[in-house]
Amino acid sequence: MANLVLVRHTESEWNKKGLWTGLIDIPLSEKGFADAKKVSQFLKNFSFNIAYTSPLLRAKQTLETIKQSLGWTGLLTVKDKALNERDYGDYTGTNKLEKEKEIGKEEAESLRREWDYPIPNGETLKMVYERAIPFLKQEVLPVLRNGENVLIVSHGNTIRSLVKYIEKISDEDIKEVEMPFNEVFIYNL
């Protein structure tokens, strides 16, 4: 039996400010680094053969902090843009609360949570799924089938996509799935 462990990156400087981040390469906040060390404690009884992450700084910094905290400096790490966060298009860099006031709470929630609800010049969750799941099938599942444990540190919408696939969550029900900071999702496959 192999373990697949999913971790959302911890708080970034833009998360702290409530900004739509998407593909902008923003570092972790001081709290984000501290929280990544806390997250590492949930993983101390695991051993991993490989770790995958997005090439975006906040995900890489979360993973590197976990690895350093646990002495896993030699853990093979693969970075792939298929694990990047959702592109927030025209909303990138805008304040989430201000945007919500502008477009309305219902519209803002639909943009954030719905399966195939478009953001102007950005991606839907469905589009993230369409790049993340082929990566999971081609790169990650073969490793798991070999009985090797895998750690993935990525972004909220990418993790939601992976969870949707693994747990067979419907397009309608995925809007109820939240990926909070500092959570560890463990699947025994």
Image: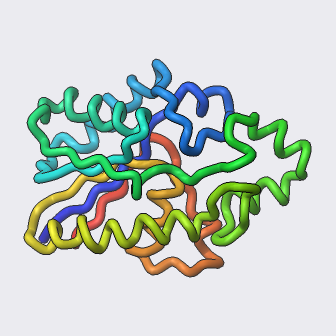
Q: Quadrant of residue 38?
A: top left
- How are the colours assigned in the image? rainbow
- Residue 116, given in percent of the width and then of the height, sits at 67, 71
For the C terminus, the quadrant is: bottom left
The residue lying furthest to the top in this view is 30
Q: Position of residue 132 (x, y in %)?
A: 42, 64
**Seen in the image, is 162 located left or right of residue 89?**
left
| 120 w.r.t. 183: above or below | below
Image quadrant assignment for residue 4: bottom left
Q: Provide residue 10's location: percent of width, then percent of height.
A: 45, 36
> Residue at the location (54% across, 43% down)?
23
Q: Nearer the viewer, residue 7 or 122?
A: 122
Is the N terminus in the top left, top right, bottom left or bottom right quadrant? Answer: bottom left
> For this rendering, which residue is in front, 48 or 46?
48
Q: Is residue 83 left or right of residue 46?
A: right
Give the number of callouts.
0
Question: Residue at 52% of width from left, 63% of height from top?
Answer: 128
Q: 56 or 59, which lies in front? A: 56
Placement of 116 over or under 149, stated as above or below: below
Q: Is residue 97 left or right of residue 182?
A: right
Q: Position of residue 8 (x, y in %)?
A: 43, 47
Residue at 12 percent of width and 49 percent of height: 47
x 45%, y 66%: residue: 131
Q: Is residue 47 above or below residue 74?
A: below
